Each structure stands twice: as structure tokens, then as C-alpha cells.
Image (cartoon, rainbow, N blue to C red):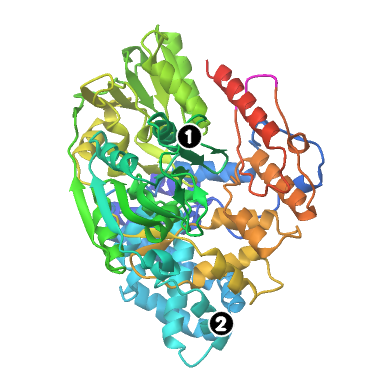
Amino acid sequence: MLSRNIALKGLTGRYIPINTSKTCFRQFHVNSFLCRIAKGPYKGKNKKNETDTTKSTNPISFFEEPNSKNPRNRERKFVSRAGLFSPETDISDDIIAIKRNSALRFLFSKECEKRCNFVGVPTSFFTKHIRDFVFKSKNEKIPRLSIKSYRIALDRDGSDVGESLVMNSFFEYLATVSQNELPRFHKLRSICDLRNIHNFFPNARKLNRKIIMHVGPTNSGKTYQALKRLQEAKSGIYCSPLRLLAHEVYTRMNDSGKPCELITGEDRRPPTAGIMFKDEVTDSSGTAVIPMVSSTIEMVNVLRSFEVAVIDEIQMLQDTQRGFGWTTALLGLQASEIHLCGEETAVPIIKKIFSKTNEDVEVNVYERLSKLTVADSSIKENWKKVKEGDCIVSFSRKGIFEIKNQIEKKTNHKCAVIYGGLPPENRSKQAEIFNDPTSGYNVLVASDAVGMGLNLKIKRIIFESLKKFDGHSFRSLSVSQTKQIGGRAGRYNVGYDMGVVTTFKESEMPKLKSMMSAVPDHISAAGILPPTELLERISYSFPNEPLSSVATAFSDLASYTDEYFMCDIKGQRFTLDLIAHENLSLRQFYTFMYAPVSHRDETCVQMASRFAKFLASNTECRVCNVMNIPTASPKTKTELLFHFSNVFTDTEKAIECKNALEDLIQKGLK
């Protein structure tokens, strides 16, 4: 009894007498403390940085260390230690119900009252219906808050799901009980109606598109078949999840004699010099265009017509941050043939989406081309057991370099390094030296960035851990993620004919074996975000309100069918708050809103603020105004998109700086 009281005191600061049964203790523990961390480390409005970065005129050093004293970082560490939001299949319905019921408490907060008042729901009205809504939710009468639906949402979104899902479900409920009341509320909901989101792309709806899916495990040749068809087409577009993959296809097309341009957020390249245009391709206005485009998914042009489109890694439409890019491409691309490559788990949701557009879906299933096995045991936390051809997967940049140093210190191996923050050119160079048997770099230490886009001579994948920090808490890898990464071992016709998967710790081997043999759940919904046109339209109803509040209101009010879910807009709201004081047009604000500004990276935040200031004043912005190139090898690197060419005119200097940074990064990785 004393030990349990001590455990509770450690979390609450005081002793609480409780029932001594284990079941009661577990339920009390979760019920009492889950609500404190259910929304992750950051609650309420985005607070301004202590240092007003917009007032400084000094260029920003690109590789400053992050502020470790940031209180948000300390709180995030507490949440990660709690680790209560891993999508484990053995979490009981009772625990899911407790999590959901904790999220429902948000309805009794001042923030909820403020958001209701903001969209025309008076306090007297929503307080009248809160308890009835909560009662119905707890009794499974609100579909999106049922145990089954909430479990899916938690697995997909993690701990951050509660507030937004509860608010959206509550407003949907209020709409049914206030049919002849609340005129402003109903008018705003009509603007946010996304139930027929496929009709936002009328040009695509006019076409009789042929949808062809290529699905199967990693290393099954599915993408190869789709790209082969793209190469045969007169015109086409490749939609990539990564800049690296977009660059790879750009190079492949040009090398095969197909003029192809590259379009990513930070890079635009014309076809390779000397390639002849065999057949002239024109757009709808009759203007000659480059036949092929290799583009990252967020930069896809849905206004141009193509003969063939290839959308890679289609299962990422369930991603809470980027899924809207895949959904937009699916619904909006004007192509006679659309080839979708990815996991078989995406087939049901794709068929469901296209049933609304009356487009048929053809499914081609592929089998893995090389053998993949799970080892009998781990390497038992001994880096001396690392062998040539091994790839150690870690989900922390700091961890990656610590592992690299340990292996190189304890063995004769040298390690190449690949992680998501590296520019595509540096990732390609690291992959090249790992694949080259004469380079001396025969071991790879990488993040899950190896799961897509690189042909690597990996014989064995070693998971340093089967948990990954998602920005709020440590969560177990999903079956799909584990198979995607593990499947990189033994790639067909690249190094080894058989792959092996294992772990660093012996205690995680049973879990690895279970996940590698499991069948992933089907994807239940595709991500969407508010269309810019509708955001602009609803903004006119709030002429004097912060645009971040308008974006939140849209997310709360939006109505959509079960095939879709609203992607997380916290990052977009942060960006809007960051530049709220600038004199920009609505379109400029919303262009910035979708720029990938990392709010945890102070350098990136400062640069975004600087860019907005230059744009608001319509003043020419040169590279030297915003950054200095370091002379020593860097520790971190930050990138930001340039969208406004009339202000950001120093293109050649920017490319020169980009190349210099990549060279420094490459030196730092040795």
C-alpha cells in the first residue's frame, strides 16, 4: 500500500489513499493523470518567443544550437517518459474509453466557450447541450467518438487527437439540435462543407480517368512497373513523397531521353541540356510545355493535363501532417491514367473514395522479389556484433551519431549516415559511399528515411528501438512502418538476395517477430486540409480576427464524410501567429501558412519571420540579408521555401549558398 501511495505522490505531489486492488490502481492511475497529458506538451495559444526575432536586422547563423532551456522541451520530455500513447493492439476498450472521456473534459473549458462564441454559438446554448452530448458520447451514440473510431484516431494522430475531434463532433451535434436557431453558426458551417470535396476539382471530374493500383510489400517491383508506363507516355507526372525520389526520377527520365523538369519546394530544374523534344506537348491554352514533370506531392500541379500520372507511397494519405497532399493529387490530377503505388492496406479506402467519383479501380498485387527473414536473436546490445552490410535504424538524430561513434570506436567499420534532415544530394552521396565496396564505409546508420527512395545494399536491418518519438510522446512503430523499414534488407538485384531483420535489444525480438508476421490494418480515412479558396471566403466573416483563429474555426466547423479526416493544423496556426503583425494579403498569408516552418527550430522560425517582413514591405530580399554561411562543418541544417520571386530575387546566390552548405554537411558526416 505504501509503495503505491509513493508512486502516486511522485506524480501528484500528495498522497492519495486508494483501493489496493491492482485493477483499481491501474484504472485510477490512468483516469487521474491521462487528461493532464492527453493533449501533448503544448496547450492553448502559441506564445511568442521571448526574443522578438522580427526586430533584429542581423543575418541568422544557420547552425545555432537549439535552446535546450525552452520550457516546452522540458515538458515534452516528461510526456515522452509517460509513453501512454503507443498504438498497442492490447490496449483495452476501457482504456480507450478513459482517454476519450478525458478529452471530453475540454468541452467544459474556457477555450471551448471562446471557440463556440467565435462562430456564433452563445454560452447559454452550448452549455445547455454539453451534458447531453457527453452522455451520448459515452454511450456510443456519437459515431466519431465511439470506442472503435477513437482507437483508430489515436493510432493515427496520437495524443493530439482529442481536442480537435471533440470540437468537430460537438459542432456537428449542435447543427442537428439547432436547425432553426444560430443563423451565423449555420452560415459558417455551410462555407466549411467538405462532404463533396471531390467536386472542388471540376476539370478532373470531366475526365474518364483510369485508376491503376500497384500494391505489394517493399522490394516487389510495383513502382518499377508504374514508372515503366510513365516512361512510355507522351506526357506525365511523377508525384513523390520525398525530394530525393523526385530527383531520382528526374535524372532517370532525362537519362532515358525524356525531357523532364524537377519541381520541389526548394528546387526547380529544367531538363538536362541537350535533350531533344521529339513530340511537342502543349497545355490547354496551346502553350508548349515540358512533357515530363517530377514533383514532390505538395507541389503537384492539378491545373495541367497529363497522359499518365504516378503517385508513389499512396498509403501516406493517412499521414496527419502531409496526407492532404496525396488526397489532393488523387482527386485533382488531370490525367487519363493514374497509377498508385504503395501498400495493399490502401486498396479499400481508394475504392471507397473513387466510388464517389464513379471511377473504376484496377488493382495489381505484387509479391516480394527476394527472401526476408527475422533473425533468431538480437545483437544483444553489443555493437561489436555489427557486420558489413548492416543498417542500424535509430529515430533520433543525436542517437544516430552516438551509434556511429560507438561502432567506429569498437569495431573496424566506418559508418555512412542517412536521416531525414539531410538534403537529397547529401543523402545520395552517403548512399553512394555505402554501396561502393571500395569506399571503406560498409555500415549504415540511418533513421526511417531509409524506408523510402534509396536503393541500398543492405543485408541486415537492426532496429535500435521499436518506438519512435512523434513530437508528443513515444509511440510504438506500426506494423506497416516496421515492415516498410525492415523490408529494405535484401533488395532484389542490389547487393544481397536475402534480407535479415533483427533488434538491438533481445527484449524486443518477440515484438519484432509478431509485427513482421502481422497483417496491417486497412487505412480507414484520407487526410484533407481546408482549401485556400474557402479559407479566404470564411476570413471575410472575421475581418478583425487573427487568421490562426479563423483556421481553427474552419477545422472545428468542417463537415466531411467518413472517408476523410482533417489533418493537424497546429503547425499552420503557429505560422499564421508568427507573421500576424505583417501587412500581407490573405493569399500571401495562406501561402505562408502551408510553408513547412518547423516551430521547434528557432532558426527556421526566425528566417520565416524575416521573409514575411521583406514580403510585406515589398523590398528585395537577398541571401546576405537573412543568413551567413558558416566556415566549419555544421551540426544542424534548416531549409525554407522561396515562393515570391519578385521579392526573393537572389536565386543564383541562393543556389550557391545551398551547394556550399551541402559540401559542409558532407564534410561534417565523415
| Residue highlighted by disc 1 | 420
Q: CA distance from mark 1 to mark 2?
A: 44 Å
Where residue 153 sits: x, y (%)?
37, 58
Q: Residue at x 33, y 65 (%)?
A: 563
From the viewer's perspective, tell me whether residue 330 is left or right of residue 649. left
Which residue is at the front of the view, 627 or 647? 647
Judged by depth in the image, the label closer to the viewer, 1 or 2, is 1
Q: Which mark is residue 77?
A: none
Q: Which residues are magenta?
A: 631-635
Q: Position of residue 619 (x, y in %)?
A: 80, 48
Instruction: Choose between 516 and 57: the one closer to the eye.
Output: 57
Provide residue 31's location: percent of width, then percent of height: 40, 59
Question: Is residue 412 shown left or right of residue 117?
Answer: left
Q: Is residue 157 visible?
A: no
Q: Amino acid at mark 2?
A: Val
Callout 1: 10 Å neighbours few (<14), some, many (20+)?
A: some
